[in-house]
Image (spheres, coloured by chain):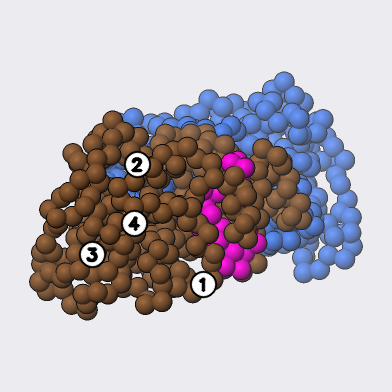
Chain colours: A blue, B brown
Amino acid sequence: MNKATFYEKNKTIRVGEVEAVAPGPGEVEVQIAYAGICGTDLHIYHGKMDWRVAESQIMGHEVSGTVKAIGEGVEGIAVGQPVTVMPLAPCGKCPACKAGHSHICYNLKFLGIDTQGGFQSTWTVPAYTIFPLPADLSLKRAALVEPLAVACHDVRLGGVKAGDFVVVLGGGPIGTLVGLVAQHTGATVLVSEINPLRVEIGKGLGLDVVNPNDVDLPAWVEERTEGAGADVVFEVTAHPAGAEMMTKLLRTRGLAVVVGIFSDPLKVDLFRFFWRELQLRGARVYEREDFAAAIALAASDALPLDGIISAVYPLERLIEGLHQLEAGGDVMKVLIQCS
Amino acid sequence: MNKATFYEKNKTIRVGEVEAVAPGPGEVEVQIAYAGICGTDLHIYHGKMDWRVAESQIMGHEVSGTVKAIGEGVEGIAVGQPVTVMPLAPCGKCPACKAGHSHICYNLKFLGIDTQGGFQSTWTVPAYTIFPLPADLSLKRAALVEPLAVACHDVRLGGVKAGDFVVVLGGGPIGTLVGLVAQHTGATVLVSEINPLRVEIGKGLGLDVVNPNDVDLPAWVEERTEGAGADVVFEVTAHPAGAEMMTKLLRTRGLAVVVGIFSDPLKVDLFRFFWRELQLRGARVYEREDFAAAIALAASDALPLDGIISAVYPLERLIEGLHQLEAGGDVMKVLIQCS
């Protein structure tokens, strides 16, 4: 039996047991070491995705662990191998998959949301989602690979290059990782974050962070870029204020990358897009190359990733991690030790 | 003395005379043959740009003609040479100019709007705005080069290539030209236009035109693209319905090119940009290469350009052309014969 946590609706997390899933053909059972709590898990906990998740949903999709068992026909993966999971199961048949964009498949199953997830002792997943980890990468840090892959995807789609001036709107876990990856690429990075405690965390990680309630951000960026504006702005707030701000900061033909999930259509200054020939693109999850890049980055010691981890709780105390994130404040990423 | 027409505010056009401007150093005086009426001229006539235009403004910036006189220091231009004018005067010093985007200069002067324009017998302009015309290009058709250059710019920034499925929202003069240029590039083009008379004009020019009031456009595009969606959508309506429609038509990572001038921020579905990793870019006026491409296209007989010309009036009857455009209906481009 696996130890597991279940989301039972109404902001209720139940700790219990569940039958471990023996890996079928093409599957791998992973002994989960650590699983990070994602903003989406908090969203589920808040009841916002009850239409989508299962009864007694096991959440969690940012995992690290070791291979426990291997199903029929799986090759190139050894028991005991440290691994992480890219939690996307595309259909392979829709127009997005056919166009080579299987990460945004029309019928995408997100493992741990549309299937049972990783907040349990072992997690059985398709073998194609498994990424082996280098032996010298700690499993704690490896639990950050999934959100780091989001940042690698965003920065890649943003076309960020050395010498660029980049602004990241929103200094939560994803915004902070986007800032760190962009900075590692050689860009000058400014992070905008309204939570004073997160401003301090970001600064502690070596980022230049400002609070847009304290400074005139467009004037600040204009001054720093000799009137030109930013090359790339990452919108990671999912707040109307961010959507309004992004167009004010960009140079002619600059690019806004929309990472934040805006649930409703909202006002965007299309005139500014026309006037300055601005560009925008959405960026969602990651592709295999982003996962590979994230693993290499995590193993390289180039980024202060351990500083992103605010707390580690045992599986039984998942609810405390959710409460800590709910309260906000002095917190970035909370990991759950699953076995 | 030049014959000229003056915009005297309050929807008043005065026909009169004005001193011809002798070309100073670096300037060229062009004997204007034809000048097209732009939507912007109609906008000025409606009083929407009174804050910007001069007292007794001479409008007109879509011109063809022959060189009448040449100022000091101008080389490579001969009297009698047929020419057109790219009516942009950038400052050369601002961040946009320094970045190589002088066509969207921060301090751009648009000739004929921010300076006196081409609805007169001769027009004196900077020599660098002059583009010589091939001898076999009629001056009537050459008056379409400026709007055709807009279309060439839009299609180029849209990255349209052979085999693409392209939708153009708005079948007025610019949308029609965008559709024709995209079709010439080898794309399959669908134009969406609500004015039934313009639907017929577009069809007569060899375009596939539908009225979105008669068909379910997203379903239509989905069916035509086997569920994938359009590669590129050109938003040329500047109407909220167009901004809403564009995101519904695009394939994963498809591109919306914003050509229409939206005066106010309006609702855009940023979730769809995120979900399908859509892209957007604004496209404004043209660059030198677009003007060169437009001249070559106009001279090539590849496009049914003469069919865009709905009427030609002598200079004294500019007001009739404005009224015809104001009334809408069965009209595309109206030319004014200036001398």
Between B115 and A306, which is closer to the camera in this rendering? B115
Between A188 and B166, which is closer to the camera in this rendering? B166
Q: Secondary structure at mark 1?
A: loop
Up the image or down, A89 lies above or below B298; here it is above
Q: Residues within 10 Å of mark 3 (few under 14, many from 20)?
A: many
Tell which circle, 2 or 3, labels the residue nearer the N-terminal end: 3
Q: Pointer 2: what residue?
A: B319
Tell which circle, 1 or 2, labels the residue nearer the N-terminal end: 1
Tell which circle, 1 or 4, labels the residue nearer the N-terminal end: 1
Q: Residues within 10 Å of mark 1 (few under 14, many from 20)?
A: few
Is disc 3 on the same chain as disc 1? yes
The percent coordinates of residue B64 (x first, y second) are: 33, 63
Q: How far apart in space, not on screen, are marks 1 and 3 (Cα)?
A: 25 Å
- Looking at the rendered image, the quarter that the N terminus of chain B falls into is bottom left
Q: Pointer 1: what residue?
A: B301
Tell me the amino acid under the disc marked 2.
Ile
User: What segment carries the magenta color?
Assistant: B171-196
Between B41 and B178, which is closer to the camera in this rendering? B41
Is disc 2 on the same chain as disc 1? yes
Tell me the amino acid under the disc marked 4.
Gln
- Left or right: B282 as drawn, with respect to A65: left
Q: Pointer 4: what residue?
A: B337
